[in-house]
Amino acid sequence: MAEKQPIRLTDRIHLIDGFDLGLPERTGTYVISEKELTLVDTGPSSSIKHVKKGLAALGFSLEDVKYIIVTHVHLDHSGGAGLLLQDCPNAKVIVHPKGARHLSDPSRLIAGAKMVYKEQFDQLFDPIIAIPEDRLLVKTEGDQLEIGLNCRLDFWDTPGHANHHFSIYDPVSNGLFAGDTVGVRYDQLVRDGIDLFLPSTSPNQFNPEKMHQAIERMTKANLDTIYYGHFGKTDHPKLALQQVKEWLKIFVEEGNAAFTSNQNANQLAERLLERVRKYLQLQDVNDDHEVYDYIRVDMQVSAMGIMHTFSK
């Protein structure tokens, strides 16, 4: 796997590709170059070697890292935080109050991920290192973090994808690090001039009403940029938010149809994939496009979350 140079998004924000699931442009770590060097999301432990190389390529040492923010504690975003922290002696990990206990004792996170990923778990996520409580810093709705003379990050409580999810507003770029709350951006299609933003409805805390509320909140904020957990940024946030809102309605409709007809999550995943395929065919995207390596995984996990929500 060829190492990639960090992607320059602005004069102070870079994105390091973490090659989550072994795929490029799947999940990344944002590097905010301010007085207090700040990272947003680490990816799983398998990504940490890429994060370290990316920081070195940017001219930073691990001792420079002051804050490691995790948007939420799903392992594809926070699973490597404990491993990275071991080599960042001056850093603290910032987490939502509902996620802190899972970082200090990740046993439930591990059990939940093993239910989803089964025999692939060790390859994808091991090891998960517990984080000492004295190195955790909890932030919630309305809290701020000063990382530079002219940069005070704001934390927004944004459930919908997960109850332990916050988003981080950056006033300098008028941008929001949105994690997974308002969906997934497919960089593989952007190169072809196609924007696709799909909801991420993974188990087991997907809540369509709260996700819709988060979409509306971000729309009203008149952002210039959204930085996605998967993957990269858009400078057209209103288009992206409108699209993910429309797809959220489709996901819920398909979930309801699958649930009422006693279909399982695999069958729902196929229904969702077919809806996306028909949409992309209208955009002249071939069925063998590389983006389907990503979309198939996402539809499988999203279908599990939707069916779990309908079963409650």
Image (cartoon, rainbow, N blue to C red):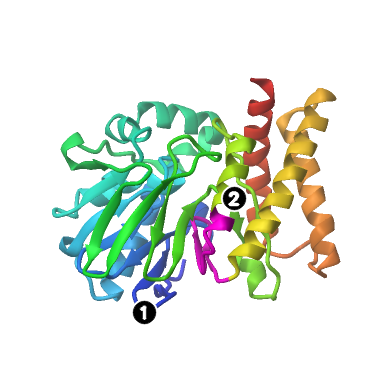
Residue 294: which disc?
none
Residue 152: image x %, image y %? 29, 61
Query: Which residue corresponds to the image point at 48% horizontal and 43% vertical from the top-left?
Result: 158
Secondary-structure class at tag 2: helix
Residue 140: image x %, image y %? 35, 41
Furthest residue in direction bottom, as rendered:
11
Query: Which residue corresponds to the image point at 85% horizontal and 65% vertical from the top-left?
Result: 282
Q: Is residue 244 among the parts visible in the rendering?
A: yes
Under mark 2, the amino acid is Ile
| Residue located beneath label 2 in the image | 215
Say whether marks 1 and 2 touch (CB < 8 Å): no
Furthest residue in direction top, as rendered:
312
Query: Which residue corresponds to the image point at 14% horizontal and 53% vertical from the top-left?
Result: 89
Q: Quadrant of residue 203?
A: top right
Q: CA distance from mark 1 to mark 2?
A: 27 Å
Residue 186: image x %, image y %? 62, 62
* 28 sits to left or right of 214: left
Residue 11: which disc?
1
Secondary-structure class at tag 1: loop
* 21 sits to left or right of 156: right
Furthest residue in direction front, as rendered:
220
309 or 289: nearer the viewer? 309
Q: Nearer the viewer, mark 1 or mark 2?
A: 2
Q: Looking at the image, is 9 positioned above or below residue 115? A: below
Q: Is residue 293 among the parts visible in the rendering?
A: no
Residues in magenta, as a range: 218-235
